[in-house]
Image (cartoon, rainbow, N blue to C red):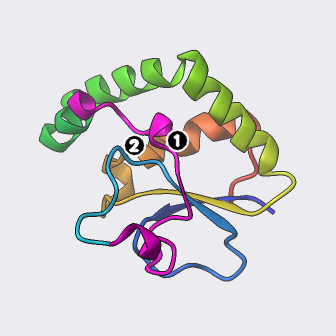
């Protein structure tokens, strides 16, 4: 039992468990009833996604300094009560169930899910 950090839309790993989409928008052109069967997500958690403004900032980050600025702002968003409580819940659940948390970005190193990984680890989550 643990949390996997995944790219949404990729094949599920054996025993991955419930897949949570931490994205601002659902996948384009995919009917809602097919989100899970097409390996996007089972449950949508947009509260853990960066705001639209921050998504644009992340996509435009060309260097380490710009990425660090995005990171600081995203971490600040995740300190707000709604997001913080969700992170605490996921960290606790990681010791009782298998879960996956993901985003669409190809490169995890330049995606908010890399920061989610860190935030979950800081809360004691078991990460696969």
Estimate the x, y position of residue 74 in percent, counting from the top left: 39, 27
- As displayed, is residue 93 above or below residue 56? below
Q: Which residue is mark 2?
A: 112
Q: At 42% from the left edge and 65% from the top edge, which residue is drawn?
A: 7
Asked where in the image residue 88 lies, by quadrant, the reply is top right
**Quarter the C terminus occupies:** bottom right
SS at mark 2 in the image: helix
Q: Is residue 26 above or below residue 118?
A: below
Image location (x, y in percent) of residue 67: 26, 34
Q: Say left or right for 121 vs 8.
A: right
Nearest the eye: 71 or 13: 13
Magenta span of residues: 31-54
Position of residue 29 measured from the top left corner of the image (x, y, whole percent): 23, 70
- Above or below for 118 versus 39: above
Viewer-proximal residue, 118 or 17? 17
Can residue 72 be seen here? The reply is yes
Residue 39 is one of the magenta-drawn residues = yes
Residue drawn at x 37%, y 21% as measured from the top left: 72
């Amino acid at each position: 039992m643990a949390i996997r950090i995944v790219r949404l839309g990729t094949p599920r790993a054996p025993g991955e468990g419930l897949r949570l989409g931490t994205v601002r928008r659902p996948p384009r052109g995919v009917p809602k009833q097919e989100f899970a069967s097409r390996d996007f997500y089972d449950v949508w958690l947009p509260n853990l996604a960066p705001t639209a403004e921050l998504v644009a900032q992340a996509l435009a980050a060309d260097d380490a300094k710009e990425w660090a600025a995005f990171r600081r702002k995203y971490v600040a968003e995740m300190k707000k009560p709604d997001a913080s409580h969700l992170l605490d819940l996921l960290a606790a659940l990681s010791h009782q169930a298998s879960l996956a948390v993901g985003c669409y970005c190809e490169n995890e190193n330049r995606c908010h899910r890399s920061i989610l990984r860190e935030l979950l680890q800081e809360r004691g989550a078991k990460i696969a």
